[in-house]
């Protein structure tokens, strides 16, 4: 049983609010507890962050990077320990947990590069007159993260926000709070000053308190679309810079000429990986023309994946019940089950967990819930399309815009999808087209509220501001409109 804490002013302290349980999705057993943060806990946390922020911002970028480098080495040293914790509280397989943490480390490594690459700029704009820009921190900033990547999504934000000199306040998902204490321990061991990094446990009320607090200048949010939209609206109405990433319903366009092995493996991995609980998972297969043997290949590969072995669990009983009900409703509306993952066989010690095997629905109608709504589980809905134009029209009509992939061997088809798709991240023969650093991560439409992206160079822009300085020391011989 883990007692999960807040991390405020360099100390692990209990919240003063209601006590909450954390359950393992793999077994249904209670594995930890935490207490919600109250407004006075949040007040205290922001006060210590505000105190620490100016010193941290004045610390040379190279010194900030050297602490981040220590943080990286501790994460790598403790990779197995942290991954086991991620797996236990989120239900992912150990391999998925490790891969997520390593993607977070990749963002951290990108943030280390800022010490050398982001040196500002200075130009003589007219005789004796110089313009200069300096990248500066925003002050105290906050990150609010979802359950499905307990370390990776926070690590999209933490390293870059710290590298550019902000004090960072993290509100982890209340469904997976335990990993946050391991990351805070790593920060503490690396030697960051108290207040530079803060963890506040809690749910909706904590988020609202952070959004309303005048001491927070920017908020990064990742979660479902309705909440992303409300966080964006509330935060910006209080004058904050907000970037809020939302949910997804990602299509894969399957062309008849696709390479069978690459396509069937890519599609099966995309919708079943992390048990379909990732915002880059494919959940709609736009089957163009005659692709029966390819679909058979996807079914065969997905059928071989066993929940509890190659596949992780669904986050909660409520999510599992919702998924099972959604599948039943789609079938009652006329969809055909090519693979039914409901009530799968699992080993006896996992019987109390929340399990759903790979599920494939065929003949899904374009306007239905199975085709349009985010379900967030290992389910893919096949929508039949006569041609590529019909598939692209379906994609364009989606309210979401996170990712869109195509499997084809035709370069002109690939180029058409890349240029006409309305999503923010496109995959060409890649089922989970997550951009690697320094390319930034972010979607369009209701998959993202705010401008810019969350990682890479775009993340650096989000977590910092440019100050412009114009200087003239001596009387300039040049007389122009600036004089
Ligand atoms: P969620 O929206 O329920 O929760 C996200 C965060 O908001 C959590 O920290 C939670 O405590 C908090 N929260 C919950 N209810 C709130 C409310 N009413 N007001 C304010 N804050 C609230 O999301 P989730 O279920 O934890 O995560 C899954 C969702 O996240 C999916 O929709 C998935 O697509 C999305 N996601 C998106 C991306 C992306 O990059 N676009 C990445 C990962 C996950």
Image (cartoon, rainbow, N blue to C red):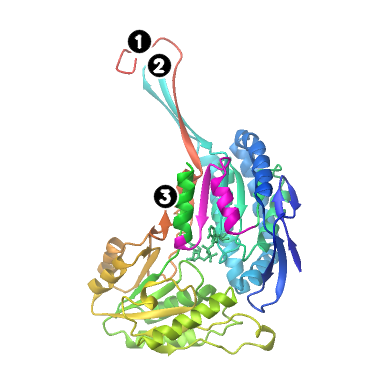
Q: 10 Å neighbourhood of mark 2: few (<14), some, or many (≥20)?
A: some
Q: 10 Å neighbourhood of mark 3: few (<14), some, or many (≥20)?
A: some
**Residue mark closest to the camera, 3 vs 2:** 3
Q: Which residue is mark 3?
A: 452
CB atoms at circles 1 and 2 under 8 Å apart?
yes
Comes first in the chain, label 1 or label 3 = 3
Give whichever of 266, 27 is nearer the camera: 27
Asked where in the image residue 274 lies, by quadrant, the reply is bottom right
How far apart are the alpha carbons under marks 3 and 2? 36 Å
Q: Secondary structure at mark 3?
A: loop
Give whichever of 470, 250 is nearer the camera: 250
| Image quadrant occupied by the C terminus | top left
Query: Within 8 Å of ligand 1, the CB of disc 2?
Result: no
- Horizontal placement of 14 versus 302: left or right? right
- Horizontal placement of 460 versus 184: left or right? left
Q: Which residue is mark 1?
A: 477
């Amino acid at each position: 049983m883990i007692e999960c804490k807040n991390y405020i002013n360099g100390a692990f302290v209990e919240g003063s609010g209601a006590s909450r349980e954390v359950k393992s999705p793999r077994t249904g057993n209670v594995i930890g507890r935490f207490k919600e943060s109250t407004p006075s806990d949040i007040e205290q946390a922001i006060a210590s962050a505000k105190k620490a922020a100016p010193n941290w911002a004045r610390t040379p970028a190279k010194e900030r990077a050297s602490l981040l480098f220590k943080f990286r080495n501790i994460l790598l040293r403790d990779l197995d320990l942290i991954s086991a914790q991620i797996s236990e509280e989120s239900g992912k397989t150990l391999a998925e947990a490790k891969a997520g943490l390593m993607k977070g480390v990749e963002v951290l490594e990108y943030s280390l590069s800022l010490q050398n690459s982001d040196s500002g700029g200075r130009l003589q704009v007219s005789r004796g007159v110089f313009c200069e820009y300096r990248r500066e921190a925003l002050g105290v900033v906050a990150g609010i993260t979802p359950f499905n990547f307990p370390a990776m999504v926070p690590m999209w934000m933490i390293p870059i926000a710290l590298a550019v000199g902000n004090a960072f306040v993290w509100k982890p998902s209340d469904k997976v709070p335990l990993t946050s204490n391991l990351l805070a321990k790593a920060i503490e061991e690396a030697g960051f000053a108290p207040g530079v990094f803060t963890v506040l446990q809690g749910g909706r009320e904590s988020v609202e308190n952070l959004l309303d607090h005048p001491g927070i200048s920017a908020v990064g949010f990742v979660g479902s679309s309705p909440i992303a939209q409300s966080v964006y609206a509330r935060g910006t109405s209080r004058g904050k810079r907000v970037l809020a990433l939302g949910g997804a319903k990602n299509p894969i366009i399957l062309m008849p000429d696709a390479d069978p092995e690459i396509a069937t493996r890519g599609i099966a991995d995309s919708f079943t990986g992390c048990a379909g609980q990732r915002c880059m998972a494919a959940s709609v297969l736009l089957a163009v023309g005659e692709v029966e043997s390819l679909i058979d290949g996807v079914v065969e590969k997905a059928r071989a994946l066993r929940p509890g072995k190659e596949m992780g669990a669904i986050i909660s009983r409520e999510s599992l019940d919702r998924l099972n009900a959604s599948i039943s409703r789609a079938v009652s509306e006329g969809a055909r089950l090519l693979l039914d993952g409901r009530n799968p066989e699992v080993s006896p010690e996992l019987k109390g967990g929340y399990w759903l095997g790979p599920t494939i629905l065929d003949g899904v109608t374009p306007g239905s819930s199975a085709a349009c709504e985010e379900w967030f589980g290992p389910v893919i809905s096949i929508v039949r399309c006569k041609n590529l134009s019909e598939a692209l029209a379906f994609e364009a009509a989606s309210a979401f815009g996170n990712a869109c992939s195509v499997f084809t061997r035709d370069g002109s088809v690939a180029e058409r999808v890349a240029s006409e798709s309305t999503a923010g991240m496109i995959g060409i023969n890649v089922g989970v087209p997550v951009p690697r650093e320094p390319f930034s991560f972010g979607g369009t439409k209701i998959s993202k509220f705010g401008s810019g992206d969350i990682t890479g160079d775009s993340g650096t822009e989000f977590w910092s501001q440019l100050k412009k300085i114009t200087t003239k020391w001596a009387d300039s011989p040049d007389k122009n409109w600036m004089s």
